[in-house]
Amino acid sequence: MMLRVFVSLVILIFACVYSAHGLYFHIGETEKKCFIEEIPDETMVIGKYRTQLWDKQTGSFLPSTPGLGMHVEIKDPDAKIILSRQYGSDGRFTFTSHTPGEHQICLHSNSTKMALFAGGKLYREERFRMTSESTNQRVLWWSIAQTLILILTGIWQMKHLKSFFEAKKLV
């Protein structure tokens, strides 16, 4: 009897646990991605996202750009807008469905060519500055080494000439 209650309780707990799934996708600069999801009545939907720029030259993500964000628009089965809002580069949106059916969830970047250009430009400027500073350090140490070599060569030449002139008895 105790085992049946325990098994029934476990089944009840698993039945009460809501299912969840996630998506991972890329959106182009002016691209809009829409998803159609069958959502039951009175269901809370939570979406999390992160926007990053991809640098084709380096093959890596660029640091986050100020002003870059995501616009989220959600429509219910009757095509009424439930949510239409602008968010930052990292964010989370939440809504509760009030009618069951297919909800349309659309996301698109608020970026413009100028915002992308500014972000890429700042990144390239930072990389160029780091390269310039590194080159400057190497040039500095090379010039110090050359100066030391010149001084040491001059001292050696003076000693060598002095001993030469003393050997010839000119001094």
Image: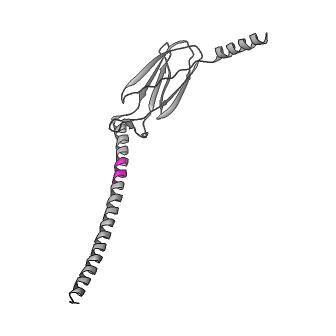
What is the quadrant of residue 141 in the picture? bottom left
> Relative to residue 105, is residue 126 depicted above or below?
below
Q: Residue at image x 23%, y 86%?
A: 167
In this view, the residue in front, 99 or 152, is: 152
**Above-or-below relation of 162 to 102:** below
Instruction: Give yes or no for residue 12 being in the magenta stretch.
Output: no
Q: Quadrant of the N terminus?
A: top right
Q: Is residue 120 left or right of residue 91?
A: left
Residue lying at 39% horizontally and 24% vertically, measured from the top left: 32
Q: Quadrant of residue 133?
A: bottom left
Query: With 131 as the anchor, is 51 left or right in this view?
Result: right
Percent x, y of residue 170? 20, 89
Give the percent coordinates (x, y) of residue 60. Answer: 39, 37
Q: Is residue 6 found left or right of 32 in the rendered image?
A: right
**Residue placed most toward the observer, 90 or 130:** 130
Q: Main secondary structure of the magenta part?
A: helix
Residue in view at x 37 percent, y 38 percent: 115
Residue 144, how many percent across, how many down? 33, 66
Residue 21 position (above or below residue 121): above
| Label total for image | 0
- Where residue 46 sits: x, y (%)? 55, 25
- Looking at the rendered image, the quarter that the C terminus falls into is bottom left
Q: Residue at x 37, y 48 (%)?
A: 126
Left or right, 7 with respect to 149, comes to right
Q: Which contiguous range is marked in magenta?
A: 127-132
